[in-house]
Image (cartoon, rainbow, N blue to C red):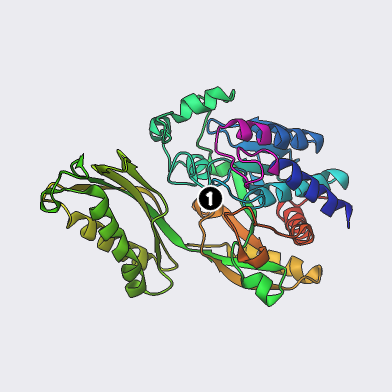
Amino acid sequence: MSDLQQRIEKHIEILSQFTATPGKGTTRLTYSEEDLQARNYIKEIMKEYGLSVREDGLGNIFGKLEGTLKDAPSVLVGSHFDSVPNGGSYDGPAGVVAGLEVAGLFSKNNLKPKYPLEVIALIEEEGARFGGGLMGSRGIVGLLTEEEFFNITDKDGKTTVEAMTGIGLDPSLQKKRDPKTLKAFLELHIEQGPILEEKGIPIGMVEAIVGLTQLEVTVEGRAGHAGTTPMDRRADALVAAAQMIAKFPEFACKEGDGTVITTGRLNVWPNGANVIPDKVVFTVDIRSGKEERVLEAVEKVMEWVKSYNGHGIKTTVQQQLYMPPKVMNQQIVSLLKQKCSELNLSYCSINSGAGHDAMVLSDVTDVAMLFIPSKDGLSHCPEEWSSSKDIANAVEILYEAAKTLTEAE
């Protein structure tokens, strides 16, 4: 095993220990104690590799290797370090570790870039604590305003500001970044699907990322005793919600073009075994490679939900996130393909069915992504696993591309 592989395995192993659910996967919610532990480790490695470290007003971490050109835009390499509840050790951290090791190779080989190289570790990509997802990158590009950020709360009513200050972060620092300071963004991510492993190909060259939206639906009814309220007198919020949700797969199939609709979170009040539910809040995640399919599906879902208003039931829908499909920068994709060939690594073109920070940053800079195989195609679970050899291959490709993009000597 190469030194690079050993370093990668060590980083992944250490980061995986920062979990709220030991033995049951990685649970690292944004601004939690586990976030702070991972954050401190990432910053420590950045400093060890000779990078100057800073955090912004969202808690995103930047490790910068200065370039020789004054005030030049940076080439960013990295990913996110939060997780879903009971997730895996690779979704996000593999890309952060890759960024660290690209910088490590610059340091080891004593390279002096013209354009700065920055390793970036982003917060709240998953949206597991504050909803919506992609919060770190949306803040950087200005899609999430200062006011919106300050008004976000988690399920316990805790604000972003309270959570940030709780682990010693400063929410008053600047959040939006001037696009003029960005030259490119490169992100490595695990595939989270079976294609690369089944084909036996080590690198997926991402050509495009699907469009996605997340809705939050609130259904309000009327509580009552489970034994004494006749069926024809009920306004049961959960029954109405269940009927709505049951129709979504049919909408997705009719849309076609790989459209998918998922209800992943559902909360019921008062959540008593012998009480008719009076309020239900659930999420609707809609994705497709074609923007018109996403928009049509949103319209159908909203109309269907609205049709339940009346007879004691009231519905409201909030759109928490909307991202149109994004195409990667063809020049950088070509550069990555060229580096693959030079390193004798096979690759195939692939589209991403999952959303990533790269899709957000593509609004303001040139972006490209690499995928590596996921064992059995599994992700968002403790069994998630990718080989350190595949990560090391991707690091070599990103390192060679970063040398070109920063014009390092």
Q: 52 or 213: nearer the eye?
A: 213
Determine the residue located farthest toward the front in the rendered image: 227
Q: 142 or 158: nearer the eye?
A: 158
Left or right, residue 176 beside residue 96: left
Residue 166 place in picture, x, y as percent: 54, 23
Left or right, residue 277 beside residue 212: left
Quarter of the figure with residue 401: bottom right
* Residue at x 35%, y 67% (from the top left corner): 249
* Residue at x 55%, y 38% (from the top left corner): 29
What secondary structure predominates along the stretch shown in magenta? loop
Quarter of the figure with residue 286: bottom left
Callout 1, which amino acid? Leu
Q: Which residues are magenta?
A: 16-38
Q: Is residue 20 magenta?
A: yes
What residue did someone put label 1 on? Answer: 361
Residue 277 place in picture, x, y as percent: 25, 44
Residue 124 place in picture, x, y as percent: 53, 42
| Residue 226, visible in the rendered structure | yes
From what the image shows, is residue 260 above or below residue 319?
below
Residue 355 place in picture, x, y as percent: 51, 56
Quadrant, the N terminus: bottom right
- Per the image, label 1 sits on a secondary structure element best described as helix
* Residue at x 83%, y 43% (from the top left corner): 107
* Residue at x 50%, y 24% (from the top left corner): 172
From what the image shows, is residue 56 above or below residue 7?
above
